[in-house]
Image (cartoon, rainbow, N blue to C red):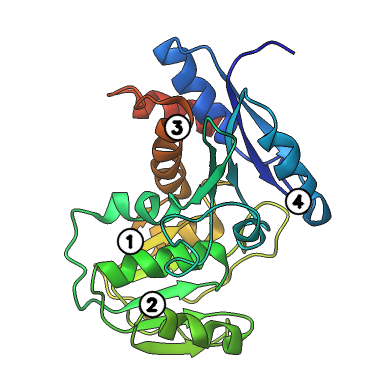
Amino acid sequence: MSNIPYAEVIGDPIAQSKSPLIHGFWLDALDIPGDYRRAHVKPDELGAYIENRRADPDWRGCNVTMPHKGAVMDLVDDPGDIRGTIGAMNTVVRQPDGSLIGTNTDAAGFYSPLAELDLEGAPVAVVGAGGAARAVLFALARANVGPVTILNRSPLKAMGLLATFGLKGDVVALDAPLPPVSLLVNSSSLGMAGQPPLDLDLSPLPADAIVYDLVYSPLHTGLLKAAAAHGLDTVDGLDMLIGQAALAFELFFGASPPEGRDEELRALLVAG
C-alpha cells in the first residue's frame, strides 16, 4: 500500500455515501496527495476497526455515519466534551502520537445554510431522534429557537432530547399533524433510498416556512417535492453534507476546501 495520507467514512450501510466524491474533488482541486475511501464497518466490528486504524500512521481519521455515532464515543478521546453536549460523534481525527480525538461537524454543517436567518423564538419541528437529530437540536438551541416539536416513532426516546438541549416543546408520534412551524427538519432516514417514505401533510405550514431534509440520496426526496408543490422554500441534504465535510477535510488534510467551486461540486454529487 502506498504511503499517502487517507481518511474514510464508516457506516453500515455505506455504499450510498457521497463523502468520497466530496473529499476526492477537493483533494484533486488542491493537488493534495491523499485518498478518501468508504469502509463498511458493522456494529460488532467497530472496536477492531478503530484499533486497527489507530496503528496506521497514514490514516488521518474517519467520518462516522449511522449507526456508529453513539458507540464510537466509547472508543476515542473526547477533549471537547462532545458526549456532554451533542452526544454524538461524526468525526474521528488521528493525532501524530496515535491518539484519536472525536468531534462533531454535523451541527455546524446543518446550521450553515440557515445562518443568515433570524430563527430566535421561531417554532420548529424535527423528525427523528437519532445522532443527526442531536446535532440539529444542539444547533437550534444555540439559535434560541422557539418551541420545538419532535416527531418520532418512539416519543419516549425523544422526550429526553428536549431536556438535554434545554429546549421547550413537545414530542408527538410520526403520524401526528404538524404544527404551524417556521422550519421543518427531517433528521431521520425516512425517505432515503431503501427506507420507508416520510409522508407528512404539509398543509398546516405557513407560506414562509422552510423545509429542510438531511437525506441526500435521493436528493429530491418525497418531502422536498411535497414542499415545492406547496410553494415552500427548501434546503436539501447536500448543503449539510458539504458543510460538515468542509470542517472534517481541514481536520484530516490540514487545508480549507477550494473557494468558489461549490456549484461544480454539487453538479458532480447530483450526477454521481
The three-letter amino acid code for the residue at tag 4 is Gly
User: Distance between the Cα atoms at labels 3 and 4?
Assistant: 23 Å
Q: Badge 3, how many Cα within 10 Å: few under 14, some, many 20+?
A: many
The answer to which of marks 1 and 3 sits earlier in the sequence is: 1
Q: Which residue is mark 3?
A: 249
Q: Residue at x 47, y 49 (%)?
A: 237
Instruction: Name the outermost residue toward the front.
Output: 97
The three-letter amino acid code for the residue at tag 2 is Phe
Q: Secondary structure at mark 1?
A: loop
The answer to which of 220 and 213 lies nearer the viewer is: 213
What label does residue 47 carry, if any?
4
Q: Which residue is mark 2?
A: 165
User: Distance between the Cα atoms at labels 1 and 3?
Assistant: 35 Å
* Residue 80 appears in the figure: yes
The three-letter amino acid code for the residue at tag 3 is Phe
The answer to which of marks 2 and 3 sits earlier in the sequence is: 2
